[in-house]
Image: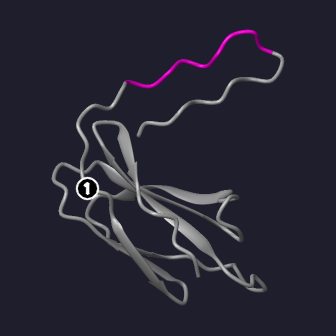
Amino acid sequence: NCGTPPTFAGSSTEAPKPATCTIPFEKARVWYSGNQFSWATDAQGIQKFSIVYGQTADNLIYGVDNIPASSRSIEINGREGWNQTWFQVWTWKDNCAEKSEVIDP
């Protein structure tokens, strides 16, 4: 699932499209406790991970990119006052991402 790049406001052309991903690989299994967001995967050849998060499932507007492939968790602070945090982990391989389920609080 490489996704669809955005189009630019006022532009009659679309942004370049990423390569088509044809080799599926395992999505990360994810969970969290407090400020610690964790994941597991058995996929080989992972380039990196990314995490997106937000206060609602349909508005994951915050994120961390370029998490090393050897990492299996990240601590995210600064969410004081949030009632809940929804998040999703992206596993990157061959410049394509497999997205985990969006995890509800």
Q: Position of residue 102 (x, y in %)?
A: 52, 65
Residues shaded magenta = 11-19
Residue that carries the numbered disc 1 in the rendered image: 26
Residue at position x 45%, y 63% from top? Answer: 101
Instruction: Note whether 72 is above or below 48 in the view shown.
Output: below
Q: Is residue 2 above or below residue 34?
A: above
Specify whether 85 is left or right of 64.
right
Q: Which quadrant of the rendered structure holds the C terminus? A: bottom right
Give the quadrant of residue 94: top left
Residue 18: say if magenta.
yes
Local packing at callout 1 (Cα closer than 10 Å; few below 14, some 14-19, many 20+) is: some
Quarter-wise, where is residue 41 in the image? Answer: bottom left
Q: Is residue 58 left or right of residue 104?
A: right
Residue 34 in picture, x, y percent from top left: 54, 90
Residue at (69, 24) in percent of width and height: 7
Q: Secondary structure at mark 1?
A: loop
